[in-house]
Amino acid sequence: MPKKKKPDQVFIVEPERTNTVKIHVTGDMMPNAVFLKILEHLKTYRAENTIAFVVYNINMMRLIGESIPSEYYNHIEISGPGAHPQEGALEHAG
């Protein structure tokens, strides 16, 4: 039986009528692939938008704060599991 594909650990939400892009990062670890995906999103959106990170636990908040220079984003939000916009992502979050 094939393995069930895990949802991405990083995804983008662009609220309407704002110039803010929210980079949602699930899980409590940051593998190299996740870090590179975050950098890719920063390159794509930083020039024209305000960047905010949304995380779902304190470990990821700490990792982003330590690994991404604060000049590249406006703030980091911590959100509860019930507010998660991507269906099923927290099941595999870590």
Image (cartoon, rainbow, N blue to C red):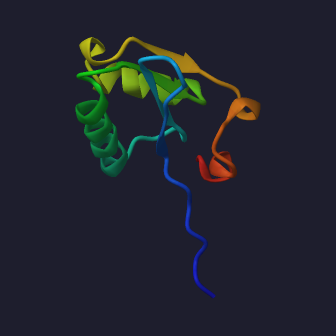
Q: How many labels does the image show?
A: 0
Q: Quadrant of residue 34?
A: top left
Q: Which of 61 and 83 is in front in this view?
A: 83
Residue 21 place in picture, x, y as percent: 43, 25
Quick check: 16 above or below 26? above
Quick check: 71 above or below 16? above
Residue 14 place in picture, x, y as percent: 49, 30
Q: Which residue is painted at 56% across and 61% down in the image?
A: 6
Q: Nearer the viewer, residue 65 or 17?
A: 17
Q: Which quadrant: the N terminus?
A: bottom right
Q: Which residue is painted at 70% across and 27% down in the image?
A: 80
Q: Quadrant of residue 37?
A: top left
Q: In which quarter of the image is residue 40?
A: top left
Residue 26 place in picture, x, y as percent: 54, 39
Q: Is residue 52 left or right of residue 66?
A: right
Which residue lies most toward the bottom here? 1
Quick check: 91 above or below 14? below
Q: Which residue is painted at 64% across and 24% down in the image?
A: 79
Q: Is residue 70 left or right of residue 26?
A: left
Which residue lies most toward the front here? 17
